[in-house]
Image (tube, helix red, strand yellow):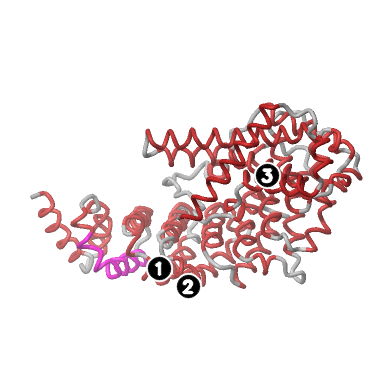
Amino acid sequence: EIVVDEMFRLEYTIGLVNDTDLPVRVQACLSFRHFLDYDLVIESITPVLPVILEKFFQVMNDFESDDLVSTLEIIVHKFSSAIPPISYALCHKLVEIFFQTSLEEETGCLAATELLRTIQSALNSLKSQPEFYPLVESALFPLLVKTIDQEYYEFFVDVLQIIETISMNSTISANMWHLFRLLYNSTQSWASEYLPNVLSIMKNYIVNDAEGFLDSRQQYLQIILHLCAQVLNDPTEVDLRVVKRVSRTFEILFHYCRESKLLGDMLPHIIQLVIKRLFSIDDENTPRALLTIIANSLYYDVRKTLLVLQKFECVEKVYKIWVECVIRGFKSKRDKKIFILGLSSIYNLPFSTLPEFLQTNFQKIFQIILKLNMDTILQREEVEENENENENEDDVEIDEEVEQEDAEDQYEEISRNHLRKRIKVLPLYDVVRKKSLKIDAINEIAYFIQSFQSGFNRENSAYQQGLLHLGQEDKQRFHNLEEQLKSSQEFNSRH
């Protein structure tokens, strides 16, 4: 009976949006938010949604109201599955209204912010149909290119979130590369505090268009390295989340630009930046973030990385800091994985070419990698056990990863709050990466075993001498790893 009453009121309200009196039309539009608690009502609205939105825009042209904009955002969010086919027209109109609204001195800022959030809601609705992103991007480009400017500073965080969503879910167009340069220029002048946010966006450019990123004529690689250097060279930048953002940027570079000679040529400069910062800090957590850069560098080019560390005479010092990190333990699975990949890469070099210190500590390094692998297996078993007990454990695990790896969502939320201290806004819809990265496809345990076995078969006597005093317990652990990998490979081949 309640639903029937609501259906009747809905039909009556739809009729009122065509009323001759503006106040009636405004109130009718505002009333739509009250019908969205009933699935049957939503199903009835969906076929006529484009008409309702058009009426909304007409009313918004005649009457400025923050409540109208917030109601529109709720509708867009509630009808996300119906938005993709009309997303271009919707965003095109929202851009028009944004520029009209943002010019208002008193109420324009809040309403314009709500409009940007409505655009973000529309973009979120496209994730199941990403083919619409390029079309919507073309509608939003005039807004994006104009708002990356100090004049629109109060909207910058929302604009960054929109760009991040597009760059994460779509191919990188010429227009998006134009925004890349504008974002860089902004960090060098009026938006320096948002450099970490900009780095997060630029990683998406590498992931989705590595070839375009490495175009030597454009110097995009040099731009990103310059931004990372700005953070690492700044002794006042002590925020661990910012350092982790830089670390993750280098991870993306090393995994997506493995064939880049230019990146290889810049490797000595990168390592010098890292070790300079590494040896100048005294807290417990930042070294781990910096060492993940060296670990990724070892995986990228172990020979050149070790040569650079030898040149700066810091192999032993880096090793000791690395051991301290391992002793303290890892909560982040990703950090653990990166450390395993980096250390295991030494087995890809002839034993005699390793730095003397690594030859002397060959057994200890093997035991460190073995420990990290055993910890990884134990952590996986604990997750599987928890998943069997709680079907919602996946969500918990994602939250922990975000918090422990680089806290990117939290950092962005802090930045938004800093910018909007005086503005009342609705909760943001987080930008969440669902696309797998290259490192996600690497089995670190398999990489360790295969790299070690290859080196052992290549230089049997050197390896036996290097592991001469290895205990029976560690030998058994390694054997168990081999058997587990073998069983896993056999299972995968059968299925």
Q: Residue at x 49, y 65 (%)?
A: 99
Tag count: 3
Q: Tell me the kind of residue under disc 1.
A: Ser
Q: Which secondary structure is most common in the magenta stretch?
A: helix
- Disc 3 is placed on an element classified as helix
The image shows residue 231 at horizontal and vertical percentages of 74, 45
Q: Earlier in the sequence, mark 2 or mark 3?
A: 2
Disc 2 and disc 1 in contact, CB within 8 angstroms: yes
SS at circle 1: helix
For the point 68% across and 44% down, which residue is it?
448
- The quarter of the displayed image where residue 44 is located: bottom left
Residue receiving disc 3: 448
Q: Amino acid at mark 2?
A: Leu
**CB atoms at circles 1 and 3 under 8 Å apart?**
no
| Disc 2 residue crowd, few under 14, some 14–19, many 20+, Cα 10 Å | few
Inter-mark Cα distance, 2 to 1: 9 Å
> Which label sits on residue 135?
2
Q: CA distance from mark 2 to mark 3?
A: 44 Å
Residue 388, percent from left and from top: 38, 36
Q: Amino acid at mark 3?
A: Phe
Q: Quadrant of the C terminus?
A: bottom left
Answer above or below: position of 311 versus 48.
Answer: above
Kindly tell me whether residue 244 is visible in this rendering. Answer: yes
Q: Nearer the viewer, mark 2 or mark 3?
A: 3
